[in-house]
Amino acid sequence: MNSVRNGSGSARRSAGRPVVGICARTAPVTLQGAAMTVSLAFQAHVDMLAAAGCVPVLLPLLPGTEDAIGQLDGLLIPGGPDLDPALYGGTAHPETRGADPAVDAAELALVEAALGAGLPILGICRGMQLLNVQRGGTLHQHLPDVIGGDGHSPKTAAFTLGRYRLDLKPGSRIAGIFGDDIPETACHHHQAIDRIGTGLTATAWSSDGIVEVVEATDHPFAIGVQWEAGHTEDDRLHSALAEAAGRALRETARSSA
């Protein structure tokens, strides 16, 4: 494990509960009649990680947040807005929305530090796309232009999840997580991986050929999934991250002893 993680507090090591950072998202809300912007995390991610024995912590996406990596045992990068296409040499599609270069830069710095430290990583939706772009990959900016339909992000009056059966690569980490009980994806994304980044390999696809999982080949546990993990009761991905974070914590304790 990279030395950036050494020096984690003895109280945390003795408690034995891995600390997993969750990249924050921001949203406008009205609270007690006042309009404000808040940093938040999807409660299902918090609950699933806590149930798996972790201490979830919220990471605001600000310059310098990557300095917290040495106090973490794992990182969850959740869904969120589109990435700035300039990051992978593209120009904005009319349907590309929500891109914030400052947020992208802060999150990319966090992911780069986590990868460099060997920290277990789970990227979900945008998180998978961010991992791919960080490794030099590119994205399809508007998936309906590629597959000719909106099955991955259904256009309905209410928020509706698309459903696809996964095709897993035998022997992959994701196949080990799911075994013979392969889930049906619950997805809501209009972008997807085009060219796969360096050091990543595709290990699952939807029935229409869209990459649904990538794994880092040069890292102990770095997985990106394209679907909205956390929107169903299936907590196996969060549990796998928790297990990897627990191993990282024990390794840090041994190296610091």
Image: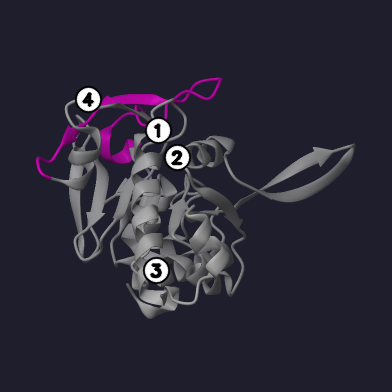
Dot placed on the residue nearer the N-terminal end, 3 or 2: 2
- Measure how far apart labels 4 and 3 are at the Cα level: 33 Å
Front tag of 2 and 4: 2
Front tag of 1 and 2: 2
Q: For the residues labelled 3 and 2, say whether their Cβ atoms are less than 8 Å apart.
A: no
Is residue 55 shown left or right of residue 28? left
Q: Which residue is mark 2?
A: 52
- Measure how far apart labels 3 and 1 are at the Cα level: 26 Å
Identify residue type, mark 3. Thr
Tell me where the magenta segment starts and ends, as one range: 144-171
Front tag of 3 and 1: 3
Q: In this view, which residue lies farthest toward the right? A: 33
Identify residue type, mark 1. Asp
Which quadrant does the C terminus fall into? Answer: bottom left
- In the image, residue 181 lies at what x, y percent? 22, 25
Dot placed on the residue nearer the N-terminal end, 4 or 1: 4
- What residue do we see at 9% from left, 40% from top? 170
Q: Which residue is mark 3?
A: 252
> Quick one: SS at disc 3?
helix
Identify residue type, mark 4. Asp
- Measure how far apart labels 3 and 2 are at the Cα level: 19 Å
- What residue do we see at 35% from left, 76% from top? 2
Q: Which residue is mark 1?
A: 235
Crowding at dot 4, Cα within 10 Å, few <14 / some 14-19 / many 20+, comes out as: few
Q: For the residues labelled 1 and 2, say whether their Cβ atoms are less than 8 Å apart.
A: yes
Q: In this view, which residue lies farthest toward the top? A: 157
Dot placed on the residue nearer the N-terminal end, 3 or 1: 1
Q: Which residue is mark 4?
A: 181
Identify residue type, mark 2. Ala
The chief SS type of the magenta part is loop
